[in-house]
């Protein structure tokens, strides 16, 4: 076809033999330009209209960048949250923004949330401060059964706390009192508590989005409770089952958030706020080396020099980079670098400031420390006299208790730890399962039913030590069995020694060695009348960084009053998710769990009636930070990290500990004395260490008071006093 190929009068196409030229009508081009500009103007007007209609961003009465958060970014020291700047409480739903990590009350949303429950996990929130629309972006998602179990137990716990204490005000169930609230642990069963909660139509609708009540849903709940050891704790771990009573691993309900049941909430949360450059950065917790004659004077020099470093006026404009919490492997890689001064930032520094003790009572100086009450246990199968203990707090998940007294000699720390009789290395009265029975001297222990554990009151963290276990009934004698060994503070007291990665044990039946519940052949059986000797060795620290880690001590302890007796309450070390994964590897794991760092050349050598049996364990797992953490994910050493002699008994098994100096069967090939020390000497050594740390804490708090005074000009009174306790709490039951 030749000539024009278009009927459009605005286009003229001329074709020659070589090319085609398209000529656009100028009038059409002008019209298109005008139309385009009109569309742009209309779009701009629409955008302006939308922006104009957007609600204004909220104006906060506080600066969120100045809030000092804990490591999991769930509690801040100012106890200021949300748009309203009010505290979080157990009875009110709140949600964490995924951007700024602050918490916001459901009632404070621009469109208040109505159909919600406290302690939800399956949601995402972008607060109106972080949202592009200046309003909350809140979305619910389908929850796993594990998350549902967690939410139910958290709600049941909160309801139980409130119903048991009707006289408590709203302030008493706020995050300000989270340490007191965390001590309240409740257990709930699937049949009696969890299922009825979910049978409620409203609760099911809120928690079980898009889930049908299939015939197997209750069985699925039980399976999650049984298998999720990283989230739920059975009241009796030794007999854990679907029908066991369960509580949350972390009883601090203010830690409950969208990542709780992922199992990584203690180790991998990234903090989004800057680190606070003040005394709360803990640079005033100095490197202290024991058995050094100049330790006190050196500490004074270090504290004094750090006052200049810690002057907030010199640091107020300095911002530190965000910190990403690391795994065992990565943290240890920092520590092992040679020729490098210890960088304290490898620790988690988002910890509480030095806590100012509450004031004395006049009666505190006249009180006489007393032993727990001994109640005779009647048992026809046991000829010896054994006693159960009452009227004292027992160590439990997340908390540790030590007897203390008021001391006017140290006006800053005000209280000091004391010892209870008998004054020697023995089984600890507090660090034991409540189902273990003792003789009066605290050297012999037994149980009536399943395996339970008791730890000694002396720990081993360096050097060579020797002690004996005297088996007074074991290996099936009258139905009794025993396991003996050493255990860290993370090891469960309601399970046998060797149950987890925090303890190493020998089993009387078959003479097997047991670690992480995995028995392996080692020696011949032992039983009633046998004496098993342990030579435990931890090489002395040679590297500079490891020495600093060992002596990086932080000992904030809160005095409480329990049945008229003063005790220190402090955070206890808890099992880590990595250790749980190592003990119970997932069948669908992409790669095997990474074992924790070891103490090279450490070992446990075993003797039976004086005869060497061999080396049961070597290269034991390391216990110094970051390999031990409190419930608040703090990488700190309170001075008593290490391994403790431990015994566990079953159905009347009886074990007696012998720490020396006179042993039943001393080893012939090991000279006891300066090289290998009888463990009884560790008792007085620990007391000396505690006195030294008391003196250093007294000096430290004295200088901290001066710094706190200097902060008063730039901090409000409420913020400055946030670490003070007004009075000792009266505890009726633990």
Image (spheres, rainbow, N blue to C red):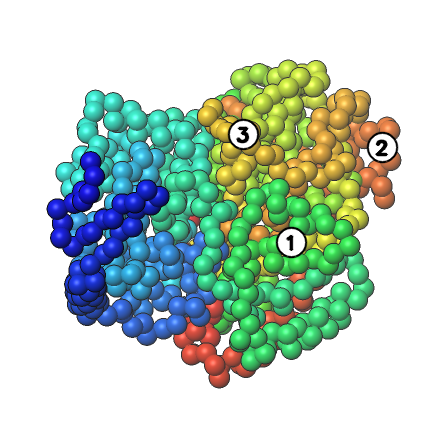
**Residue 609 visible here:** no
Q: CA distance from mark 3 to mark 2?
A: 43 Å
Q: Provide residue 40's location: percent of width, then percent of height.
A: 21, 64
Helix, strand or loop at mark 2? loop
The residue sitting at the bottom extreme is 713
Q: Provide residue 726's location: percent of width, then percent of height.
A: 43, 70
Q: At 41% across and 59% down in the image, what residue appears? A: 75
Mark identifier at residue 143: none
| Residue 263 placement: quadrant | top left
Helix, strand or loop at mark 1? loop
Q: Are marks 3 and 1 in contact (CB under 8 Å)?
A: no
Q: At 49% across and 28% down in the image, what residue appears? A: 589
Q: Which residue is mark 1?
A: 639
Labels 3, 2: front one: 3
Q: Which residue is mark 3?
A: 591
Mark 3 and mark 2 lie on one chain; the one further toward the N terminus is 3
| Residue 186 placement: quadrant | top left
Quadrant for the N terminus in the image: top left
- Closer-to-camera residue (394/28): 28
Mark identifier at residue 670: 2
Number of numbered discs overlaid on the protein picture:
3
Q: Provide residue 490's location: percent of width, then percent of height.
A: 55, 41
- Closer-to-camera residue (195/79): 79
**Residue 17 visible here:** yes
Q: CA distance from mark 3 to mark 1?
A: 35 Å
Q: At 42% across and 79% down in the image, what residue appears? A: 716
């Amino acid at each position: 076809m030749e000539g024009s190929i278009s009927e459009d009068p605005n286009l003229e196409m001329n074709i020659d033999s070589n090319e085609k030229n398209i000529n656009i009508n100028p009038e059409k081009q002008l019209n298109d330009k005008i139309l385009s500009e009109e569309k742009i103007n209309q779009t701009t007007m629409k955008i302006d209209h939308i922006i104009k209609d957007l609600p204004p961003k909220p104006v906060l009465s506080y600066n969120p960048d100045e809030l000092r958060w804990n490591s999991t970014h769930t509690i801040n020291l100012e106890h200021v949250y949300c748009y309203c700047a009010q505290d979080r409480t157990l009875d009110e739903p709140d949600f964490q923004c995924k951007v700024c990590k602050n918490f916001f009350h459901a009632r404070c949303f621009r469109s208040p949330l109505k159909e919600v429950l406290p302690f939800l996990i399956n949601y995402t929130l972008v607060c109106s401060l972080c949202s592009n629309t200046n309003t909350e972006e809140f979305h619910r998602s389908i929850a796993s059964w594990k998350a549902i179990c967690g939410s139910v137990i958290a709600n049941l716990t909160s309801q139980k706390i409130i119903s048991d204490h009707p006289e408590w005000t709203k302030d008493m169930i706020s995050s300000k009192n989270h340490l007191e609230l965390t001590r309240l642990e409740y257990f709930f069963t699937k049949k009696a508590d969890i299922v009825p909660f979910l049978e409620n139509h409203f609760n099911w609708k809120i928690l079980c989005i898009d889930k049908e009540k299939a015939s197997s849903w209750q069985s699925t709940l039980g399976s999650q409770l049984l298998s999720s050891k990283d989230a739920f704790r059975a009241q009796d771990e030794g007999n854990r089952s679907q029908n066991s009573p369960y509580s949350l691993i972390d009883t601090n309900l203010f830690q409950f958030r969208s990542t709780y049941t992922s199992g990584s909430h203690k180790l991998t949360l990234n903090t989004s706020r800057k680190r606070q450059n003040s005394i709360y950065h803990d640079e005033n917790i100095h490197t202290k080396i024991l058995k050094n004659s100049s330790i006190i004077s050196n500490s004074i020099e270090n504290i004094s020099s750090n006052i200049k470093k810690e002057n907030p006026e010199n640091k107020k404009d300095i911002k530190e980079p965000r910190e990403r919490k690391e795994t065992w492997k990565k943290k240890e890689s920092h520590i092992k670098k040679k020729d490098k001064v210890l960088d304290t930032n490898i620790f988690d520094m988002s910890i509480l400031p030095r806590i100012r003790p509450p004031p004395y009572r006049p009666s505190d100086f006249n009180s006489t420390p007393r032993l727990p009450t001994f109640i005779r246990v009647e048992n026809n199968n046991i000829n010896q006299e054994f006693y159960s203990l009452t009227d004292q707090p027992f160590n439990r998940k997340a908390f540790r208790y030590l007897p203390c007294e008021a001391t006017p000699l140290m006006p800053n720390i005000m209280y000091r730890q004391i010892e209870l009789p008998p004054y020697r290395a023995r089984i600890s009265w507090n660090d034991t399962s409540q189902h273990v029975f003792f003789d009066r001297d605290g050297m012999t222990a037994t149980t009536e039913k399943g395996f339970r554990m008791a730890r000694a009151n002396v720990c081993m963290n360096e050097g060579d030590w020797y002690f004996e276990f005297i088996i007074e009934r074991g290996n099936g004698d009258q139905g009794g069995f025993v396991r003996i060994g050493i255990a860290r503070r993370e090891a469960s007291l309601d399970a046998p020694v060797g149950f987890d990665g925090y303890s190493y044990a020998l089993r009387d039946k078959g003479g097997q060695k047991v670690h992480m519940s995995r028995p392996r052949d080692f020696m011949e059986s032992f039983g009633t009348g046998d004496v098993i000797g342990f030579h435990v060795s931890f090489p002395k620290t040679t590297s500079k960084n490891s020495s600093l880690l060992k002596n990086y001590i932080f000992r904030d302890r809160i005095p409480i009053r329990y049945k008229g007796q003063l005790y220190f309450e402090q955070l206890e070390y808890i099992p880590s998710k990595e250790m749980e994964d190592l003990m119970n590897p997932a069948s669908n794991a992409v790669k095997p769990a990474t074992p924790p760092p070891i103490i090279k050349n450490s070992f446990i050598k075993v003797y039976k009636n004086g005869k060497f049996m061999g080396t049961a364990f070597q290269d034991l797992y390391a216990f110094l930070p970051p390999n031990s953490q409190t419930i608040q994910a703090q990488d700190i050493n309170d001075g008593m990290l290490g391994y403790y002699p431990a015994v566990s008994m079953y159905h009347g098994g009886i074990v007696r500990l012998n720490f020396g100096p006179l042993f039943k069967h001393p080893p012939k090939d090991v000279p006891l004395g300066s090289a290998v020390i009888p463990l009884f000497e560790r008792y007085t050594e620990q007391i000396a260490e505690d006195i030294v740390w008391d003196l250093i804490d007294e000096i430290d708090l004295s200088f901290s008071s001066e710094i706190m005074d200097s902060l008063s000009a730039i901090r409000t009174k409420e913020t400055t006093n946030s670490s003070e306790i007004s009075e000792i709490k009266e505890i009726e039951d633990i």
